[in-house]
Amino acid sequence: MERPSRRGLLGGAALVAGAATLPASPAGATASSGGPVTAPITGPITGPVTVYPGDPRYQELTVGYNQRWVGAPDYVRVVSSTAQVVAAVQEAVDAGKRISVVSGGHCLAPFVFNSDVDVVIDLSGLDEVYFDQQRGAFAVEGGARLSGVYDTLFKKWGVTVPGGMCPTVGIGGHATGGGYGFLSRQFGAVIDHLAAVEVVVVDRSGTARAVTASRDPGDPNRDLWWACAGGGGGNFGIVTRFWFRTPGTSGANPSRLLVNPPKDVLLSAVGIPWSMLDRTKFATLVTNWGAWYEGHAAPDSPARILSGVASLSHRSSGNVFLLTQVDATAPDAARILADYLGALTAGLGADAVVAAQPAQRLPWLRAVKLIAASIPSFINPTLRGSSKSAYLRRSYTAAQAGAMYDALTRTDFANPAAAVTLAGFSGGAINAVPATRTALAHRDAAFWTLFETQWQDPAADAANIGWLRDLYGSVWAATGGYPVPGDQADGCYINNPDPDITDPAFNRSGVPWQTLYYKGNYARLQQVKAAYDPRDVFRHAQSISLP
């Protein structure tokens, strides 16, 4: 998915006020000097471009969405074809250089940009979206961003993939981790529509080559497709191209071969002032939320047409918000929305919800763009951040909700961008797929949660990271600080990687991080790693290890 944000939700009633203060100098502004300086790009990227330290572009190409993580590679190679990726990988392998790859740059952990990386391969020039007649599927190149994917697929063919909200997220990391969004309860995860991948791998002899792997049961490379469908980015090779086609579709008409989004959706934004919430009412809201999704998680639930986000930001923000999207063309859409909002706010009191707006009926793509435009953090290039995640099968307990309340009302820490976000992007069609069909193992969750804080000043790192650790550790205190798979919880989402998950000082559960991310699928992922990356060329701090 892409992460729901606490910085604003849909304008008006749900937009957190306040302009961001620009820092004195952006993180990573002091790029290392020396080395060749490349000439400016004057037209479309047709060949590889190598950017060295000292080039004015270097600092922009060595930091991603999270400004905490800044790299210092020998160079960045900007590529625009699979052949260029093969050549870039071969050159780095021959020179014994450590590789990382960037698609959209939204990796929240230091997997791409860190001091161990010598070469960053940037896929931003590899961003075409088109229908591949030979494969009968939609090709999306590995550097495409979600906004471009949605625009092209819908405007040309009236189709989409059920992905996340943030427009600048790259398809590479998003899809390989599973990929969720407002349409996922209705249509499944992004990888549930993945027909094939093209991956640049390195064999035991050190030779780089491009391999195509598909979901066809007879494909000798099918295990590589399986691993790329939820096994996380940066583990097996560089995915240069994805092909999407919904299982069970047939014929030659492209408009019938992938998900057709609703013609219109209903968007609802509800604001609840913090002044109306005491500890008991806050816990009621949280447990109501979980109970609704728990009760509507089945693949055949009529309410799978609805997905929502509850942004429970720090009290200093002034409000908590409920943002909901419903397929307006489905039977009883308005009633399902009304029943949902009634269930979530039951017990809060009639005066609690004072910032509700009437639901807006909008064309689907317009709604996608409105949601993205209403969340300032999606386009703020100066933010530092820390995040953790949890899948839930059952609702939070009142005690866990109370732990959230205590953290979100602290007076010694007042960051409006610190939040617990309840995301209703699990269940429904996602749960119709067996846990072993793809590498995405979390197939019986009801919803998931993002625990996150963002800030700008590096001097605030310790306070924000400490606040998040305290919050998360308190919520999951009964299971050693992490959401151990069991009756209530179901582990963590690999697309929200957490550096603390490997540290026994924070993860006291005794459950390995590999199990929290991958559950029973990890051993098979290791076998795929051994087959396609036997030299461990593609690795990071939490990559799949060789068996």
Image: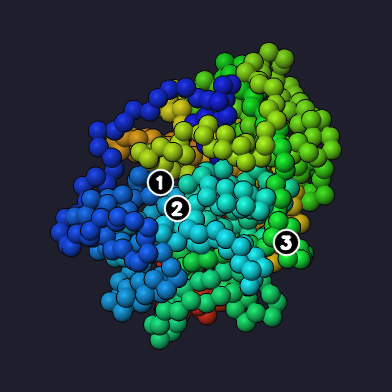
Number of residues whose C-alpha sits closer than 10 Å to that of mark 3, classed few (under 14), some (14–19) or many (20 or more): few
Write the residue at 52% across / 43% down.
166
Q: Is residue 269 visible?
A: yes
Q: Position of residue 90 (x, y in %)?
A: 36, 77
Query: In the image, which is nearer the foreground, mark 3 or mark 1?
Result: 3
From the viewer's side, name the closer residue of 71 and 482: 71
Disc 2: which residue: 104
For the point 76% across and 44% down, the residue is: 304
Residue type at mark 2 is Gly
Label 2 or label 3, whichever comes before in sequence order: 2
Considering every residue shown, the one lying at the far top of the view is: 351
Q: Quadrant of residue 220?
A: bottom right
In the rendered structure, which amino acid carries the disc numbered 1? Tyr
Which label sits on residue 65? 1
Residue 381 placed where, x, y %?
37, 40
Return the residue nearer the eye: 364 or 174.
Answer: 364
Which sits earlier in the primary sequence, circle 3 or circle 1? 1
Q: Position of residue 98 (x, y in %)?
A: 33, 69
- Residue 253 is marked as 3
Which residue type does callout 3 highlight? Asn
**Does residue 25 appear left or right of residue 350 in this picture?**
left
For the residue labelled by badge 2, is the local secondary structure a helix, a strand or a loop? loop
Tell me the element at label 3.
loop
Q: Nearer the viewer, mark 2 or mark 1?
A: 2
Q: Could you tell me which secondary element the residue under label 1 belongs to?
A: loop
